[in-house]
Image (cartoon, rainbow, N blue to C red):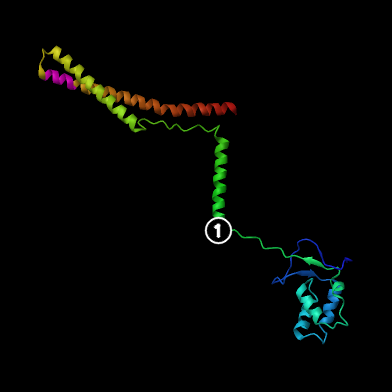
Amino acid sequence: MTSSNHPSTTGAATVHGGVNDGLIISTTKTIHSFLTGASTEVKLSDDLRQLASSLSDSPTVPYKHLRSIWVGSNPSTRPDLMGLLSGSNFVFSSPKPREKSEELKARLMKLEEAYERKAYDELVKDITPKKDVGEPFSSYKDQMGFGLHVALTMFTGYLVGYYAFRALFNHSPAMSAAGGILGLVIGMLVETLLFIIRTQSLDKKPARKASSFTTKQKKDQ
């Protein structure tokens, strides 16, 4: 038992009780003996006697209740207040942990998933083949350029066919026009063939990159 005349703090302890009654102190043998005697003291009111009886077996006592019982007790028989409190310790109630709202939990989960996804992408960025975003006619400028190129090719084919047939058929207007139309069709077919070849070459590039990446991975393993 502590020899000090004042209650001493022992850190944060948990009060196993209901309502917090302010300053709580631990029960000593002196306090227990005083409360046991007060529970049968005639000078005390019924309420204070019942309170003393209920607190006599408790490991902790609210200071204000103990003081009320002490004040109401017979001054000639009650112990000195400092002596009564000697050896007692302050008892602090632990606050309840703050609960997170469902909205906050959902937001924290989304942030955690985004962080994990970003960390994973950062981890595999050097071993994952980059996506080829190059596509034919991916912009308005490319479409306009292709259209003008087709028109120029067809017009050139028309002129070549027109003047070739004109020279072959003695300046016949009908045959010259037929030659122009034939040249236009040939020019359109040539441009279509070039377009198919160009598209196939673009499609093969990602496949070659993926194949080379797979081969490199196997070599590294």
Mark 1: few/some/many CA within 10 Å (<14, 14-19, 20+): few
Residue at 55 percent of width and 26 percent of height: 216
Q: Is residue 26 magenta?
A: no
Residue at 14 percent of width and 12 percent of height: 167
Against 181, is 62 above or below? Answer: below
Quadrant where the image shows the C terminus: top right
Most extreme residue toward the right is: 3
**Amino acid of disc 1:** Glu
Could you tell me which secondary element the residue under label 1 belongs to? helix
Q: In the image, is 100 to the left or to the right of 203?
A: right
Give the quadrant of residue 183: top left
The kind of secondary structure the magenta stretch mainly shows is: helix
Task: Give how far across and how far down residue 144 sits, in percent.
Answer: 30, 29
Which of these two is toward me, 92 or 146? Answer: 92
Residue at 17 percent of width and 15 percent of height: 163
Quadrant where the image shows the N terminus: bottom right
Task: Give how far across and how far down residue 206 sits, in percent.
Answer: 45, 29
Give the quadrant of residue 101: bottom right
Q: How many marks?
A: 1
Residue that badge 1 annotates? 102
Task: Give how far across and how far down residue 99 sits, in percent.
Answer: 61, 60
Q: Which residues are magenta?
A: 174-181
Which of these two is toward me, 171 or 22? Answer: 22
Q: In the image, is 2 to the left or to the right of 55?
A: right
